[in-house]
Image (spheres, rainbow, N blue to C red):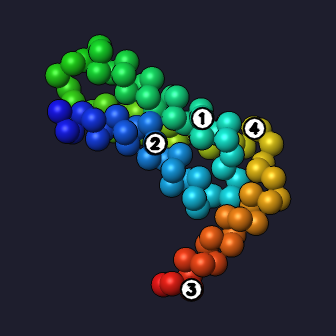
Amino acid sequence: MVGWVGGGLLSAFGFPIVLGIWWKRANKAGALAGMLSGSITFLVLVITQPFALVAEPIIAAPVSLVFMVVVSLLTEPPSKEIQQEVERNHTNVKDVL
């Protein structure tokens, strides 16, 4: 059960969180597309193959990644203020490390 929940969370939120923090081109539309595509793919796989709990995140997480990157690139980039905030946060992380 824990693996199932963890796999679902990874599929839905893993790449949108990581790319949202580290990729300046990531935007709201891309993150939403990544979360929805990862969640839907995971749920479809769970429903159609209920005993193969290992494969769902392996398939759904890359689907989320692809959708997030493609939609982010096809839509407007984040505003300059958001990009500056991301850069400022990265600078603060470098100071700590």
Q: How far apart are marks 2 and 1 (CA)?
A: 10 Å
Q: Earlier in the sequence, mark 1 or mark 3?
A: 1
Q: Distance between the residues labelled 1 and 3?
A: 31 Å
Query: Residue at image x 59%, y 32%?
Result: 33
Residue type at mark 4: give it: Leu
Residue type at mark 2: give it: Phe
Against 42, is 50 above or below? above
Q: Which residue reaches farthest top?
A: 48
Indicate the position of residue 70 as horizontal and vertical percent values.
65, 39
16 vs 87, left or right, is left
Residue wearing tag 4: 74
Checking the image for residue 13, the label placed there is 2
Indicate the position of residue 26 as horizontal and vertical percent values.
66, 50
Q: Which of 48 and 4 is in front in this view?
A: 4
- How many C-alpha atoms fall within 10 Å of the one at disc 1: few (<14), some, or many (≥20)? some
Q: What element carries label 3?
A: helix
Residue wearing tag 3: 95
